[in-house]
Image: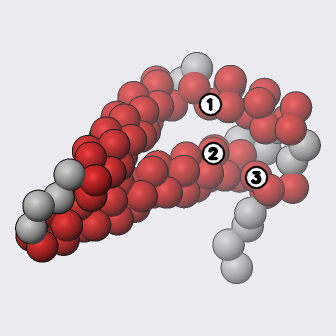
Amino acid sequence: MYKLKYFTLSKRDKNKLKETFYQTEFGQNIKKRLIRLLIIGILSIIYSIYLLITSENIWELIMGIMLLSAGLIFILGSIFIRINKLNNYLIKNKKH
């Protein structure tokens, strides 16, 4: 069974874990990629809201809805990936 040690930590321990993980080279690379995913998700949600407000035909409305769902998937995906990577780091490094 997959261990979810990350959820059992206190807020202070989670912040300490994030600091130590992001100081590694792998953590720095992951952080850049996750920030990129988050920015793409936010921009796509903003543009989809613009499309939904100013839609003149059905295709713009459909495109806005699809873009909104893709933006939400990007944001939620970046959150789940962050939790997964932090949990794997916590399991592999027993000193935390």
Q: Secondary structure at mark 1?
A: helix
Which numbered circle lies on residue 21? 1
Residue at 78% x, 38% y: name it: 14
* Residue 6, position as x, y percentages in the image: 76, 52
For marks 1 and 3 on the same chain, the one whose residue lies earlier in the sequence:
3
Quadrant in the picture for the N terminus: bottom right
Counting other residues with Cα less than 10 Å from the Cα at mark 3, is it few (<14), some (14-19), or many (20 or more)?
A: some
Determine which quarter of the picture holds residue 61: bottom left
Q: What residue does disc 3 label?
A: 6
Amino acid under disc 3: Tyr
- Tell me which residue sits at (90%, 43%) in the image: 10
State the CA–CA distance, disc 1 to disc 2.
7 Å
Disc 1 and disc 2 in contact, CB within 8 angstroms: yes
Disc 2 designates what residue? 86
Judge whether residue 81 can be spotted in this image: no
> Mark 2: which secondary structure?
helix
Q: Earlier in the sequence, mark 2 or mark 3?
A: 3
